[in-house]
Image (cartoon, coloured by chain):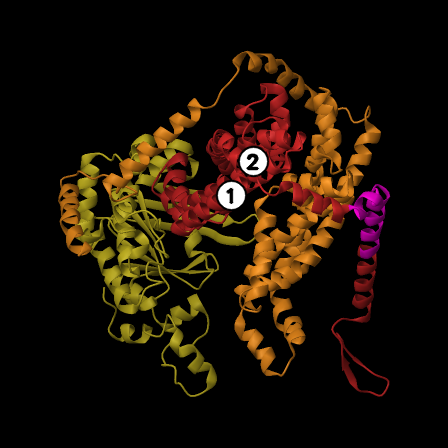
Chain colours: A orange, B red, C yellow
Amino acid sequence: MSKQAEAPLTQARQQAASRGQWRRLPLIESPRLRWGLAIGAVVYLFLALASVEVNWARVAEGAARAVNFLGAFMQPDFMSRYDDIVAGLLESLTMTLTSTVLGVLLAIPVGLGAARNISPLPIYFVCRAIIAVSRTFQEIIIAILFVVMFGFGPFAGMITLAFATIGFMAKLLAEDIEDLDWRQVEAVRATGASWWQTMNHAVQPQVMPRLIGLSMYRLDINFRESSVIGIVGAGGIGATLNTSLSRYEYDTSAAILLIIIAIVLLCEYSSSHVRRWTQ
Amino acid sequence: MPVSTTPQGQPVWRRRTTRAQWLQYLAWLAGVSLFLLCWKMISDNTMWVFVEDAGRQGADLISRMTPPEWGYANVLWKPMWDTINIATLGTALGIMMAFPVAFLAARNTTPHPLIRSAALVIIVSSRSINSLIWAMLLVTILGPGVLAGIIAIALRSIGFVGKLLYEAIEEIHPTPVEAISATGASRLQVMNYGVLPQVMPAFAGISVYRWDINIRESTVLGLVGAGGIGLQLNASINSLAWDQVSVIFIMIFATVLVSEWISARVRHAII
Amino acid sequence: MLTLSGVGKRYPTGDRALTDIELALPKGQVMALIGPSGAGKSTLIRCVNRLVEPTQGSIRLEDTEITKLSGHKLRHARRSMGMIFQEYALVDRLTVMENVLSGQLGYVGFWRSFLRRYPQEAVVEAFRLLERVGLTHAIDKRADALSGGQRQRVGIARALLQSPKLLLVDEPTASLDPKTSRQIMRLIRELCAERELAAIINIHDVALAQQFADRIVGLRAGEIVFDGLPSELDSDMLTTIYGEEEWDTTPEPMDDETTDDAPVNPPYARVLSSIEAGGAR
């Protein structure tokens, strides 16, 4: 039926083309949908932009600060708050490492449980629920709750990051296990291997390289997150950064930001090496 | 190599050579001691009294959060609209800036290696700095409000979209590009005909994915004054109105689930 | 019309791909370039339109010295050299018409091409070419929806829309079945005759080369070792070009090695029959 409707159009386009008249095919075929989407987008854009309130006087006042801040990047000040920066940085790094290790270790059982092809239904639902909750909420929100529960300091931050890591890793791990090569598993099972032996010999070799790669990636993410959860009191460099910004000590903030960028770069560089090495 | 011979002359298979085995043990030892060291530093900075108290605190928190004060939801529609706007406009602004940056950063489309390194620096700086930090900065510069949030989201998105897009550009088939250059096309025409059609699906997918992440991030930008539902969250937490906080959480949860669903649908349709 | 003198190419790795190539191609001649893989056939034709930069020598197309051109002038020169590729090199996600019209890119400005507002004559010509290669029914199909033979036809139409004086053809049949290969070669041959185009055709299949070319040039390790009529190419010459092989016997499927080779359709298996037939041209 659609072929019959198409044919005259194609013919018309062919005839037009033979006369030298040709236009690109529209991306969306139905004109009503095409115009509807376009008008909808324009209307949304209008409404959204209209609801953005800008205090131009305040922006003009801030322009000078922006210049100051850019200037601070040219001469960052590492020294005047040296102790705070070092302490915050150490806290961030320790939090990052411990939370990644804990998170990955806990993510493995959750990930196994959330893989539909190897786990029973009730366990599957529980694990998927854990993943959904951990992924939906920003680390900051979780940090607020954990700070209330565990008190201020790096412990709450560590638990926060570990919790976020579980959701991230377990989801990807479960997806990996769900589409692993089932023939290998059957081959190992056919030798009479137990459940643990099957996991060790058929599943682990297939998911391990990616698991290591993802852990390195998560390490990197956790460091970046550890630099902000300090804002709500969960330890790390974020608190130092927050203080320096609110005191308008831009040269110190610039120094901290540069350090963060450098460490992330280092992380990325070394993680690409580790990944090549493990493969 | 891993096959060695016992004194009795029988070959023995082992997974690794002795040296590799020792190196392996050493690496594990180093890793574990590093972990313990970090753990020690954290536990030194922790008030364990509070941690032991955590269960009771948690139970207390939950009892205060329930039942949610549903009436509060009426106040939240405007902030939620702002949150969605921050994410959407910020993503749009971000991908507009990320698009040229990615082309400058990809090895096969960059006009000059020096420009490439500059583009990579932009991408790395934008990626390393969390959107909340961008928001803190912008709030001190632009003043509190939605505008700071939009720009913070946009600045953070440049790095994410830019990185994934330039990787996609580096992976395109080179032959169509070669064919288009062979027709005598100019540089821009080669990009338009040879490169762009090949990366368009990836670009659309990445943008929608980032939009989905941005919805999540924009829910907290208000904590530092950059508009959206985070402002209400901050206010409710500061006044210890936990029954309002739980309403906010439920709204965030629902919005994020919907946005995740939309993004998954769109990405599915593209691929 | 096209003259190569002393052309050499050395890759930055130090590998010498071409040494001292001397070649003159008159108007309207179809020349087949044969040789083993890695002999430098692809490099040679890519040097002509400077997709690969030759490291020495000169290449002249009519009165233009191509090796000295840059920027705008190079693009201008490329317009008169249409290129046809091994894997068709179409842009998969564009429609057939867009792919053909991309042959006009050297003639129209960026915004025109960006908005797909091509001049009327160009569209008429594109349609005529599609008619000529028998694909008018597919103008709005995406290139990746076509079969191999059809894609190669689109590639040919694109090259011809440049109104070239010279066709550079890189392994046009390598990904096609024998029947389609012959159809494509015949089409190229006919189009060259219709428009008096010269062509350099890189080709693995010696039998096809002998059948469809006016002249055959054999390349070995970056040097020309044979240059003559298709009928002059005998098994001794093939040995010089490709190395030792029993060119006059058909492989007998008795030991393992020959059976392994059989389904791959060895490129020179059909040489014998065409040599006996005296070559097509």
Q: Is residue C51 visible?
A: no
Q: CA distance from mark 1 to mark 2?
A: 9 Å
Q: Is residue A94 left or right of residue C116?
A: right
Q: Residue at x 36, y 63 (%)?
A: C174
Q: In the figure, residue A148 lies in which quadrant?
A: top right
Q: Which mark is residue B204?
A: none
Q: For mark 2, name the chain.
A: B
Q: Amino acid at mark 1?
A: Val
* Position in image of residue C263 (x %, y %): 38, 77
SS at mark 2 in the image? loop
Q: Which residue is mark 1?
A: B256
Q: Which residue is mark 2?
A: B219
Q: Amino acid at mark 2?
A: Thr
In depth, the one of A224 and C197 nearer the eye is: A224
- Magenta segment: B32-53
* Position in image of residue A134 (x %, y %): 61, 49
Q: Residue at x 77, y 40 (%)?
A: A151
